[in-house]
Image: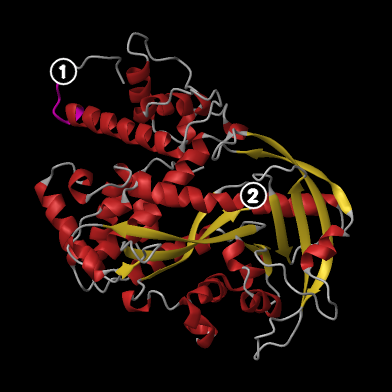
Amino acid sequence: MPNEMDAAQWAEQQFGHCQLGDKRRSRRLVQVATALAQNGGGNLCAATRGFEAAKEAAYRLIRNPSVNAEAIMEAGFEVTAQRVASCQCLLAIDDTTSLSYTHSVRESLGDIGPRPDVSTRGYLVHSTLLVDAERGTTEGLIAQTFWCRDEAERGQRHQRKQRCYAEKESYKWQHHAELMRQRLADKMVDVIAVSDRESDIYEYLLDKVQHGERFIVRAAQDRRLSESDERLSEALSDAPKYGESRVEVSQRGGRPACQATLSLRAVQVELAPPKTDTDHRESLRVNVVWACEESASKDALNWVLLTSESIADEQKIQEILHHYRRRWRIEDFHKAWKSGCGVEQQRQQSADNLQRMAVILGFVAVRLLQLREVLDNTTIAELPCTQVLSEVEWKVLWATSHPAKPLPRQTPTLHWAYQYIAKLGGFYDSKRTGRASWATIHLGLTRLDERVQGFNLLRSLDIAAVSGPKM
């Protein structure tokens, strides 16, 4: 297992081969990414820790019009493609988020306001994250698209039917499927696309079926069935039951965190094309899994999943549900990107500069998720923490957490490291779950890194009297 904590090693692997037209720009990109990774994101001033030369070099890179944000992304996507080569099964989780800005550069960005009386400006970003389906680990970004809406088009939603499919925002799902085909090539046979209700688009489903690709899409529409007057909901109500599944439900609204019992039904159906569809008259044969909580509550879970995966028995249906539940990983990525890395707090002077920073911070956010997953991995919890932390890092963590105790003779475990990194980030465990949020782990890692940097600085100054245990 590589040392995931080594920011410089991570940045070199992620961006060292990036083609920016000049090797010096690539080296500087690695330096900037290292600084941001060590700081868990944030702005360039904080990341360069007050070193004026480093700060100026970082800003020159971000402001350089010759530095292409697309090239930075492609370098990161290439690393992800290489990383997943040995994975047996992958989940490609898609979703869209918005990045909102309020400072002067906002006038150069697009309209993302939810209502006509609210003018919020920023980027819309569609991302595809690869997750190892067997281990549940985040492997990296494989596609990401930024765009701005034209404010002049606000209120013209009713005209969307007149636009061709490739010109609609909804084409983003198929566009990312096409990008994955280019980047993963033959590996696509091991990839299952997983997405929520927004992707329940006939053209997208047709594209996946025609290319023989795997998918799990949560249905948003009660579609018509081919050669029948029935709707999908009617076919599901008559579908055979395949047991039950218990799932953890996080706290939301007035509903406390709990376990929910879902009844599982499954059936194969043939979906009729939309009546307005003049280009694709082909019907679609798909499998459908219906997982519902048999409760009258308005908060009862009710998932209808359209899929290419087999529904031959209860085990396969449970597996489909398990894969779909991984979809929430993309929400964790968005939180890490925004709250952890502070992508919406950036104050660049142009839209292009802002996008360059957002792209780099996107890969830093993925690294934060990966670090939390390694630290929170129960299957390796009793391994020595040197699987993740360097010798100096764990000893500084010990000295910080146990100031009155000498260093132990035996290296502490990963479980110990997880606990005390979380406490360094302010974890109190008020909900008695024993699990810290990714933001808490991120803060703990940042504070640990600051202490290690301080220790290394004192050591470089050859100060004889340093309090605390000897390293």
The residues colored magenta run: 459-465
- The structure residue drawn at horizontal position 68% and vertical position 45%, both measured from the top left corner, is 300
Tell me the quarter of the picture where residue 156 sits.
Answer: bottom left
Q: Quadrant of the C terminus?
A: top left
- The structure residue drawn at horizontal position 49% and vertical position 79%, both measured from the top left corner, is 158
Name the residue at the front extreme.
Answer: 117
Residue 360 part of the magenta segment: no
Asked whether the beta carbons under mark 2 and mark 1 sit within 8 Å of each other, the answer is no
Closer to the camera: disc 2 or disc 1? 2
Q: Classify residue 229 as left or right of residue 148.
A: right
The amino acid type of the residue labelled 1 equals: Ala
How far across and how far down the image is residue 173, in percent?
55, 71
Residue 461 part of the magenta segment: yes
Name the residue at the top extreme.
Answer: 404
What's the distance in space between the residues labelled 2 and 1, CA to CA?
Answer: 54 Å
Residue 325, numbered circle: 2
Picture mark count = 2
Rendered view: 79 above or below 7 = below
Residue position for label 1: 464
Element under label 1? loop
- The structure residue drawn at horizontal position 10% and vertical position 48%, both measured from the top left corner, is 52
Tell me the quarter of the picture where residue 16 sits.
Answer: bottom left
The amino acid type of the residue labelled 2 equals: Arg
